[in-house]
């Protein structure tokens, strides 16, 4: 059995904060810098004020460990004044199972 890469699989990235220019670009660039592919993205701005975005990403091409990607996204979120979280797909599904 071949051991899996530390970052193998898909993950869910969630972003929440006040809307402003550059949030999508900033997060997308942080993911690109980590060689993480964005598979799907959905975003919404409520009442022209509150920004929410959820992304499904593929970690298989990244050479960085999951924890490093998570830390980079957290720092980018701080710079953009939004909250950014990444969860592995299986953990995200388990947490949202009713």
Image (cartoon, rainbow, N blue to C red):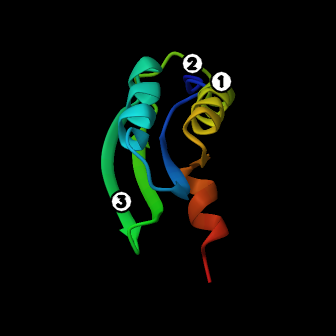
Distance (Cα) linking label 2 and label 1: 6 Å
Tell me if mark 1 has few (under 14), some (14-19) or many (20+) residues whose alpha carbon lies within 10 angstroms of its own: few
Q: Position of residue 73 (x, y in %)?
A: 58, 34
**Label 3: which secondary element:** strand
Check contact, mark 2 vs mark 1: CB within 8 A: yes
Earlier sequence position, callout 1 versus callout 3: 3
- Residue 64: which numbered mark, if any? 2
Image quadrant in which the N terminus is located? top right
- Name the residue carrying label 3: 43
Closer to us: mark 1 or mark 3?
A: 3
Image side of residue 62 versus residue 72, left or right? left
Earlier sequence position, callout 3 versus callout 2: 3
- Name the residue carrying label 1: 68
Establish if 95 lies above or below 29: below
Q: Residue at x 46, y 32 (%)?
A: 59
Question: In front: 93, or 82?
Answer: 82
Q: Position of residue 75 (x, y in %)?
A: 65, 30
């Amino acid at each position: 059995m071949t051991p899996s890469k530390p970052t193998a699989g898909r993950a869910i990235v969630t972003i929440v904060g006040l809307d402003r220019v550059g949030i999508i670009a900033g997060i997308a660039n942080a993911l690109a810098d980590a060689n993480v592919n964005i598979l799907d993205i959905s975003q919404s701005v409520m009442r022209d004020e509150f920004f929410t975005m959820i992304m499904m990403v593929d970690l298989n091409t990244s050479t960085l460990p999951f924890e490093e990607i998570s830390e980079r996204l957290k720092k980018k979120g701080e710079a953009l004044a939004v909250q950014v979280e990444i969860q592995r797909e299986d953990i995200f599904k388990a947490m949202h199972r009713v």
